Image (cartoon, rainbow, N blue to C red):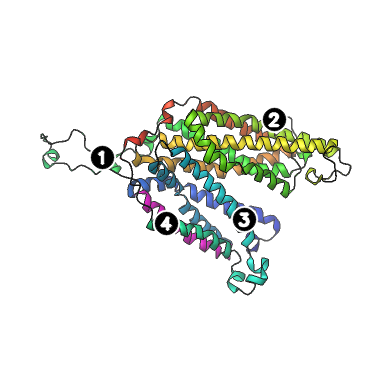
Amino acid sequence: MVEGFDIVKSPEDVPFYAGLLLTSYSLCQAIPSMYWGVLSDRIGRRPALLIGLAGDLATFVLFGLSKSFTWAIVTRSLNGVFAGNSAVVKSVVAEISDDSNRPRMTALLPLMWNIGVVAGSAVGGLLADPANQYPSIFGRCEIFRTFPYLLPCLVGSLTTAMGLFVGLFKLKETLVIPPVAAVPEAQENGAATESTPLVVQQSPEQQQSMFALLTPTCRRVLTINVLMCLAISMYYHIYSMFAASPPRDGGLGFNTQGIGISLAISGLVVIYLQLVAYPKLVQKYGTLRCCQIGLLGMVPVFFAIPFLSLLSARVEQFVANRVPVDLLVSQSWMSPAGLEYGMLWILLLALLLARMVGDILAFTSINLIVSNITPTKTTLGAMNGMQQFSSTCTRIIGPMLSGTLWGWSIKHKMVYPFNSHLVWVLCGVLIAVSWKMAMALPSSVNVFASGHLPRSRQ
């Protein structure tokens, strides 16, 4: 898309402007995310969600009409602003669930996100520039010649439109606020009577501010969330570069097909883990224990993954013409090269699966813990907004940090851990610190603190 803008003068400019486009979305999603949560605490979850969905639908279609970089970055930034209300969804899930189904319902959120990422990437790749990709079908459609990226945006907007329709006609308000007790005239004048209540119900405006929510436990939980998200965002950005880099640079030497296969196989277990395994594990061990196990399990994975480059280098040594290891099709699986190539894939998939298990245990649990430590339902939006803000910020910092460290480490060829292992070691250290902090959390985070308030309308 960026290549078609006049601002791009050479292919070398594409990564820079594409990065600006991605950063603008993430930045504009992060900044207002806390305020979406606070807004939903004041006006209700349903209005906040409907405003966000309507804005997301409009700005995403406008993004598909981009003919200049300025238009693209403005519409994409506005799209990020309206997407910032995703924290409100976490609040809704916490309010419509109870202790018997809250883990399963919370696990649905990252599952839907993963499905959306995969489906969105496929739609974008298959439907971009349809007039040239499918001339027999769209060749005569002038609108798709003028706006080559409108079709994937229109198709992607269908899911938003469906959500908006369901929200308008099916979604009921989930935030139930007890009515504010009327203050008798005598009480206003300072005189108490027998009918004067001992405790007057406060309005949401009179309740705790956002900063008052930052108790020591809350600060520790949000810090754990930041460190985890930073490590995982670095991993997602660096893995493709690591897998594609040749073994001499500390990589695996895979092509795009090999990278895709490794990610697809490990991703197949997500549905089972989130919908079946995770709720059972929470019921047996508790939310906090699952979070601790997930974090501890990821630590050795991050330290071990870069050592696979040594095995990939050994495989290349068996190949006379030194072709990339993923093109090793002429070798018999019983040959030394074939056996070590098979071992490389077995170890890689085992590590990726272990990371995926740890990821699901830790992240789904931390989402539950954030809801559990919120003192009242009228501050649930603010708490989830703070978590969303911190998570989104790490998705901006993580890719830049990991890309810079990876390029520096393979260029300078220093000793361990400052060689090609540097990014992976940093990820492992971040997760290890998160685990250490999680071990100090009190067991009270297993309990939904605001559950004593009136249940929402189902």
Mark earlier in primary sequence (2, 1): 1
Please give the label number shown on residue 166: 4
Give the CA distance from mark 4 to mark 3.
25 Å
Instruction: Give SS at disc 2.
Output: loop
Q: Which residues are magenta?
A: 44-68
Disc 3 marks which residue? 122
Say which amino acid is labelled 2: Pro
Q: Do labels 2 and 3 touch, CB within 8 Å?
A: no
Q: Residue at x 33, y 44 (%)?
A: 456
Say which amino acid is labelled 4: Val
Quadrant (top left, top right, bottom left, bottom right) of the N terminus: bottom right
Instruction: Give SS at disc 1.
Output: loop
How many residues crowd mark 1 within 10 Å: few (<14), some (14–19), many (20+)? few
Mark earlier in primary sequence (1, 4): 4
Disc 2 marks which residue? 417
Residue 338 in sight from this viewpoint: yes
Q: Residue at x 58, y 34 (%)?
A: 358
